[in-house]
């Protein structure tokens, strides 16, 4: 392998790694090896031993010491291996808390611990091919977060690993390994990046000991590890939930200037935000110059061209001790990256070693479009070279998205942005946003799964997240807010979304495994949630003061209070929705009595909400009851949930629809997160052409402003980056409704039976002349195309996989002409 000229190189050589590591799918193997097969091909020697304790062979958990809890610490591990002959293929199994990067003979072979629960740890398998005779080194860089947050629950620090070939251990983690607290990283308490993500990082390359991952490195001064025999049950991570590192993408320098003065604050982000910068000093060349009397450093801003997710990387030639503070963000609304935002700190620090510094920030991916660097050299330095800055993308492999075309340029652009948004919000699990949180929520991921079924049909990846969520049942019957986490707060209706997610996964995939694995969890949750019933109204409540009764980010529904005298219509409507999903799952299982019981209670709840919350003189449903009186709160969300359920009596439908569709401000508008219910309500039932046009109005009002020429993904809310006290996300998975609008709306495809065995096609023109596209199914893609003919009817062609049945229906505003159905 060609050695880099850089002294400090915490980055992957992807070409070399590709030669050592198989494809992402092949790296994960669930099949156990046959112990007797090919054993004669295994070289014999003192480094090899046979042990029936498969798959860990007596390996130990390694750490720096016996501590079971510590904050923000880093460890380097080396294990020398002597092979007395060639090994055709070996499997490297590794687990770490919290994260790892693995190297073989100085080349990165894999990274990224699955975001598992500490009570159910997982391991990663990496395939190594054609190992040569001689001495080799396995090296690992381990990070232990040790900070409970939305993306992590603290477990035992350290790593366990084994290198195995055909049932024979070639190396295990044990007391013969050498370890050290990774030189350069600052451990312990650090400013928070965000409360959801954990801590910021600082690396001082002056403390580097060189490339400790290669075979020639002398580790004789390193310590022996604390080694505790591994006794936990560790399972193989889901194969579908394995992101990959892609080739470095260089950013383009778009803005630069001189830093006039600086004062250290209590976080790198605050320090950067307080720097006094003259941006009229434009520096395009690699070489940066300054006058010592005028400036103490340089500020550089790079544009990645679009929203990206991955690991920040940069290189420079600068004197030892040069400080490089670097921030990331999604926009430049403030004239620079919004690095500090009310105790959120989107900045980290690197200190140069002075010998061709090239650094990639490990262990924490960032989401954003812009990188800002503040470079502060020693006082006697008047110039330096800043060579490159960009990102190494970290992406989940997905199939090509299903095609779609309709001749509407704006709609096609916003759909592409929705696809890109969903891609950026999938890594080891679904995440709400890649910039601020990276957390797995049920409400967010339900939208992401549903929308993704219309693009990729990535059922296995959805299953991995659903099983992770299902392991988070609390004693009170609710699920944890995020997964994994141990934070005490939860949102009750987010738990109610989970059975719906399981139902929709079964409906779209035709696979019952997620339901089988989590059935007991769902029934336990249901039983405990339904124990909190108000005697006077017979509706349900969630009264624990730790509950966050959130419904959406809109006035009156984002931070509600529930006490003995209050009943929430949405709480009960979501509960009814949950019960209906369980009824569907039980019906598929052939449990008719159970299904009928859950369905009957869902209907009763909706009828009771209809009875107690209808406001006669306003033609709508109220949001809250307090002391048996309907409050003045009126929300579109409530009306949509009633219409979605078909719970509005026929005699009241015209009035409710008139009030909803008026858009006169008398109802607080629905935001982006509940959009699936809007689409489903108007396509599940035929409430008329005006009701369907309401979807398009919402699409144009909320989404088209995002096509502003700067954003390449879809925002968390229509307010953009200024929402949530200037911390609004510009890439948020739950907002990708345009995908669903195109697939379930314009193309009109919805499954009627599990796995699309029967599916409905009911197209909707929405004042367009034509549209065509593809919808993935477990059996292959369904192709739909339609065209307005001379008689102002719509000729429809449907091509679907053999074994599926298409059911054709029509809306009055999209009358069908010639219909052609064929199979592949």
Image: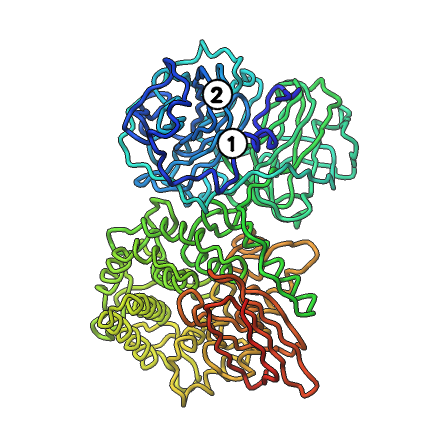
Q: Residue at x 50, y 29 (%)?
A: 129
- Report whether residue 712 is seen: yes
In the rendered image, residue 782, in percent from the top left (x then y), is placed at: 54, 67
Q: Residues within 10 Å of mark 1 (few under 14, many from 20)?
A: many
**Distance (Cα) linking label 1 and label 2:** 41 Å
Instruction: Give the SS element for disc 1.
Output: loop
What residue does disc 2 label?
A: 86
Instruction: Give the SS element for disc 2.
Output: loop
Q: Is residue 57 above or below residue 707?
A: above
Q: Residues within 10 Å of mark 2 (few under 14, many from 20)?
A: some
Q: Is residue 216 above or below residue 185?
A: above
Q: Residue at x 29, y 51 (%)?
A: 473
Q: Residue at x 43, y 29 (%)?
A: 92
Q: Is residue 241 left or right of residue 727?
A: left
Q: Quadrant of residue 625?
A: bottom left
In the rendered image, residue 246, in percent from the top left (x then y), is placed at: 59, 39
Near-viewer residue (80 or 741): 80
Near-viewer residue (578 or 553): 578
What residue does disc 1 label?
A: 201
Q: Residue at x 33, y 70 (%)?
A: 580
Q: How is the image coloured?
A: rainbow
In the rendered image, residue 751, in percent from the top left (x then y), is placed at: 45, 70
- Report whether residue 636 is seen: no
Q: Quadrant of residue 265?
A: top right
- Res 466 label: none
In primary-sequence order, the first of circles 1 and 2 is 2
Q: How many marks?
A: 2
Q: Is residue 190 above or below residue 783?
A: above
In the rendered image, residue 18, in percent from the top left (x then y), is placed at: 57, 33
Outermost residue to the bottom? 651
Q: Is residue 438 left or right of residue 285?
A: left
Q: Quadrant location of the N terminus?
A: top right
């Amino acid at each position: 392998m060609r050695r880099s000229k850089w002294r400090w190189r915490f980055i992957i050589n992807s070409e070399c790694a590709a030669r050592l590591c198989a494809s992402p799918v092949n790296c994960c193997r669930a099949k156990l090896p046959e112990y007797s097969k090919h054993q004669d091909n295994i070289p014999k020697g003192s480094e090899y031993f046979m042990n029936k304790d498969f798959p860990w062979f007596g390996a130990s958990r390694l750490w720096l010491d016996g501590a079971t809890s510590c904050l923000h610490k880093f460890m380097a591990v080396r294990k020398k291996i002597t092979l007395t002959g060639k090994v055709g293929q070996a499997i490297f199994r590794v687990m770490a808390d919290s994260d790892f990067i693995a190297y073989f003979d100085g080349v990165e072979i894999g990274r990224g611990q699955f975001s598992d629960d500490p009570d159910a740890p997982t391991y990663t398998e990496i395939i190594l091919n054609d190992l040569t005779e001689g001495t080799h080194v396995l090296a690992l860089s381990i990070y232990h977060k040790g900070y409970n947050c939305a993306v992590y629950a603290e477990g035992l620090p350290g790593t366990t690993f084994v290198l195995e070939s055909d049932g024979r251990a070639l190396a295990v983690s044990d007391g013969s390994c050498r370890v050290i607290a990774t030189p350069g990283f600052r451990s312990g308490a650090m400013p928070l990046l965000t409360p959801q993500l954990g801590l910021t990082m600082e690396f001082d390359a002056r403390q580097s000991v060189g490339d400790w991952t290669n075979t020639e490195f002398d580790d004789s001064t390193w310590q022996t590890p604390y080694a505790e025999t591994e006794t936990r049950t560790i399972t193989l991570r889901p194969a579908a939930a394995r992101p990959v590192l892609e080739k470095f993408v260089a950013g383009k320098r778009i803005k630069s200037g001189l830093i006039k003065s600086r004062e250290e604050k209590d976080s790198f982000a605050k320090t950067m935000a307080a720097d006094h910068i003259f941006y009229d000093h434009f520096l395009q060349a690699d070489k940066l110059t300054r006058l010592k009397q005028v400036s103490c450093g340089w500020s550089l801003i790079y544009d990645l061209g679009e929203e990206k997710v991955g690991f920040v990387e940069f290189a420079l030639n600068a004197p030892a001790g040069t400080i490089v503070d670097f921030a990331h963000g999604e926009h430049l609304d403030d004239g620079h990256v919004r690095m500090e935002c009310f105790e959120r700190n989107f900045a980290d620090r690197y200190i140069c070693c002075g010998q061709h510094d090239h650094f990639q920030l490990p262990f924490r991916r960032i989401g954003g479009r812009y990188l800002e660097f503040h470079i502060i050299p020693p006082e006697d330095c008047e110039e330096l070279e800043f060579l490159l800055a960009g990102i190494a993308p970290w992406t989940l492999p997905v199939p090509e998205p299903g095609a779609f075309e309709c001749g509407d340029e704006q709609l096609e652009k916003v759909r592409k942005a929705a696809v890109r948004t969903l891609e950026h919000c999938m890594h080891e699990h679904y995440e709400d946003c890649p910039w601020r949180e990276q957390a797995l929520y049920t409400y967010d991921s339900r939208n992401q799964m549903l929308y993704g079924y219309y693009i990729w049909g990535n059922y296995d990846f959805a299953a991995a997240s659903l099983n992770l969520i299902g392991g988070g049942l609390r004693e009170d019957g609710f699920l944890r807010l995020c997964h994994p986490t141990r934070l005490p707060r939860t949102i009750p209706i987010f738990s109610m979304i989970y059975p719906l997610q399981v139902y929709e996964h079964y409906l779209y995939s035709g696979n019952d495994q997620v339901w089988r694995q989590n059935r007991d969890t769902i029934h336990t949750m249901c039983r405990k949630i339904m124990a909190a019933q108000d005697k006077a109204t017979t509706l349900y409540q969630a009264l624990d003061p730790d509950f966050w009764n959130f419904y959406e980010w809109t006035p009156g529904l984002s931070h509600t209070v529930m006490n003995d005298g209050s009943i929430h219509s949405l709480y009960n409507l979501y509960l009814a929705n949950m019960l209906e999903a369980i009824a569907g799952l039980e019906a598929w299982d052939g449990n008719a009595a159970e299904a009928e019981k859950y369905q009957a209670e869902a209907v009763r709840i909706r009828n009771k909400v209809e009875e107690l919350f209808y406001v006669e003189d306003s033609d709508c449903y109220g949001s809250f009851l307090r002391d048996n009186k309907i409050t003045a709160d009126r929300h579109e969300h409530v009306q949509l949930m009633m219409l979605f359920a078909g719970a509005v009596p026929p005699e009241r439908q015209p009035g409710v629809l008139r009030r909803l569709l008026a858009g006169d401000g008398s109802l607080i508008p629905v935001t982006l997160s509940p959009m699936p219910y809007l689409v489903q309500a108007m396509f599940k039932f035929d409430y008329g052409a005006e009701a369907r046009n309401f979807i398009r109005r919402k699409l144009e009002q909320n989404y088209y402003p995002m096509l502003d020429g700067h954003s390449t993904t879809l925002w968390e809310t229509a307010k953009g980056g200024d929402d949530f006290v200037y911390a609004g996300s510009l890439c948020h998975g739950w907002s990708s409704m345009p995908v669903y609008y195109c697939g379930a709306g314009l193309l009109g495809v919805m499954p009627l039976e599990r796995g699309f065995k029967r599916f409905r096609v009911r197209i909707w023109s929405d004042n367009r002349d034509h549209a065509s596209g593809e919808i993935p199914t477990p059996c292959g893609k369904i192709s739909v195309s339609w065209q307005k003919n001379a008689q102002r009817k719509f000729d429809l062609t449907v091509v679907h996989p053999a074994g599926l049945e298409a059911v054709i229906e029509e809306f009055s505003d999209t009358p069908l002409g010639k219909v052609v159905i064929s199979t592949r």
